[in-house]
Amino acid sequence: SQQGEEDPQALSIQEGENATMNCSYKTSINNLQWYRQNSGRGLVHLILIRSNEREKHSGRLRVTLDTSKKSSSLLITASRAADTASYFCATALTGTASKLTFGTGTRLQVTL
Amino acid sequence: GAVVSQHPSRVICKSGTSVKIECRSLDFQATTMFWYRQFPKKSLMLMATSNEGSKATYEQGVEKDKFLINHASLTLSTLTVTSAHPEDSSFYICSARELGDAYNSPLHFGNGTRLTVT
């Protein structure tokens, strides 16, 4: 079964705008990770946030984690057309560190 | 670094035949590799965890005799879809994690294999 649900399912913005995607999960986690997938390709790891962390930055990416609400958000600032892709959150459940369960994904479209 | 190569990228086969997909970690060793299946515009569903030198661990509902996994070395895992049927048509993706801290390290993914069974 799906551990994570992402919201929105699809997002269309213009270049330069910020994009925010949300992920909710159901059970205790060791960490939460965000991945990006271009159409027909494999996934690329973006950022990992541990369960004891609340916020993390990497370039134009900002990830927050609220374990009390079992939710995370991914913010992409100053979006570019090249950011067009699907974005997935993935959780490593407590006690099953090596196995990741993926969310439903957000399809981001950035237009010029 | 941390490159995972998956081959082939696309394969078309006839119903009843078997197809082998290879997943190689090119510049790191991986005792564990994961095989996922993805339907169009859907998320990744974990099929099995491939363990070097031992039997794979399959997720509930995945037929181990249908999807044979072999992890013969620290850099190679293979998935064989046996007696393929059209409903096996899908996008299969492998991933691997470098040896070390399993709790805080990401997965590295291959580029996937698009299987079409006619």
Image (cartoon, rainbow, N blue to C red):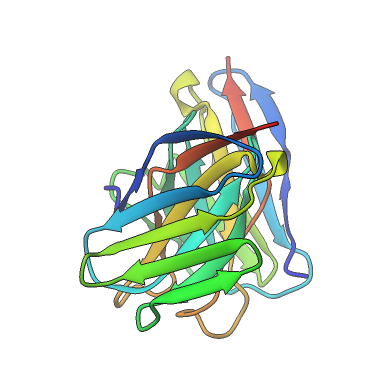
Count of marks placed on residues = 0
Residue A64 image point, x, y percent: 41, 68
**Horizontal arrangement in the rendering, residue A35 relative to residue A71 (left or right):** right
Residue at position x 37%, y 52% from top? A22
Residue for point 45% across, 41% down:
A106
Give residue A8's position: percent from left, percent from top: 38, 39
Q: Residue furthest top?
A: B118
Q: Residue at x 35, y 43 (%)?
A: A7
Residue B19, picture quadrant: top right
Residue lying farthest front?
A16
Whether residue B52 can be seen here = no
Residue A97 vs residue A47: left or right? left
- Let me know if residue B113 appears in the view: yes
Quarter in which the C terminus of chain A is drawn: top right
A44 in relation to B39, above or below = below
Residue A37 left/right relative to B84: right
Q: Nearer the viewer, residue B91 or A52?
A: A52
Front residue of this view, candidates B10 and A53? A53
Q: Which residue is more in the foreground, A84 or A42?
A: A84
Residue B41 at what x, y percent from top left?
48, 31
Residue B83 lies, in percent from the top left, at 51, 29
- Corner quadrant of residue A98: bottom left
Above or below — where is A106 with respect to B72?
A: above
